[in-house]
Amino acid sequence: MTAAFLILAAYLIGSVPFGLILAHLRGVDIRAHGSGNIGATNVGRVLGRKWGALCFALDLLKGLLPTLAAGWFLGLVRFDGAEPAATSVSAGALLVWLGAMSATVVGHMFPVWLRFKGGKGVATGFGALLGVWPVLTAAALGALLVWLVCVKLTRMVGISSVLAALSLPVFVLVQAPIARALGRVDPPPVWPFALVACALAAVVVIKHRTNIARTLAGTEHRVGRRA
């Protein structure tokens, strides 16, 4: 019952369409402008960078906060400076935590309020990964670095998001040997996190298939252009 509640609550919070809400405050139906997507990139393209940044922050928080809350409830996240208990709890609790994390991203991509037509999950996914503290935080920051470098080089957010998503499982897999090299003899098991990272990467790539097609055709949107 607890697992179902945490995962359902995370999904419903992830389903809140902040991009659509912010655009409505400006009298715009974001689904009828730009790419039609409700995510931060299209909001910024249509309404301007400040609105896009606000949408990104809100989408990030709806991934971060439910994930942190679920981890705290399950005893996996500590806010008192003590070592998180992720290495000493049951595999079941760990899977529930990852389930809640994934549910926020699924909620953003397939929101119940919008007949399951949502965003592409990048900002919410980044926030959710940060929320799996500290196990996936480093991997999330590594993927963010890949995204920033790719945006700088290509000025294309979509393909940069795809490359960042594909880098995520790699960062997850290298965390365990790095943790051992730094003296942490009992890092959390890698396989649950690697599986979730691969699944999220696959969904993000699928959600960006139109961006991939436009990139190959040379017609992809570039940063700095308003719709």
Image: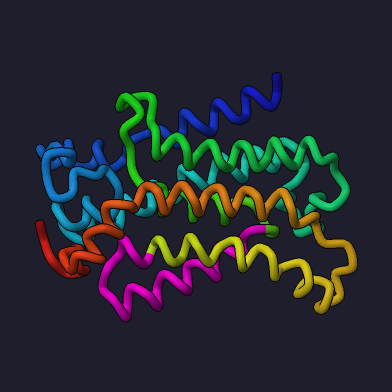
From the top left corner, tell me how far across and down residue 76 is, in percent: 75, 46
Q: Residue at x 20, y 68 (%)?
A: 222
- In the figure, residue 6 lies in which quadrant? top right
Residue occupying image coordinates x 11% and y 45%: 33
**Percent of width and height locating residue 86:** 79, 50
For the image, the number of numbered tags is 0
Q: Quadrant of the C terminus?
A: bottom left
Left-right relation of 142 to 72: left
Q: Position of residue 180 (x, y in %)?
A: 83, 72
Q: Residue at the spot x=19%, y=43% of the render?
A: 36
Q: Is residue 190 left or right of residue 216?
A: right
Looking at the picture, tell me which residue is in the foreground, 220 or 85.
220
Q: Is residue 37 above or below residue 155?
A: above
In the image, taking residue 54 as reference, residue 71 lies left or right, namely: right
Q: Position of residue 98 (x, y in %)?
A: 65, 42
Vertically, is 91 above or below 123?
A: above
Q: Quadrant of residue 137?
A: bottom right
Identify the image quadrant of the N terminus. Answer: top right
Q: Magenta residues: mostly which secondary structure?
A: helix
> Residue reaching furthest top?
1
Q: Which residues are magenta?
A: 136-160
Image colouring: rainbow
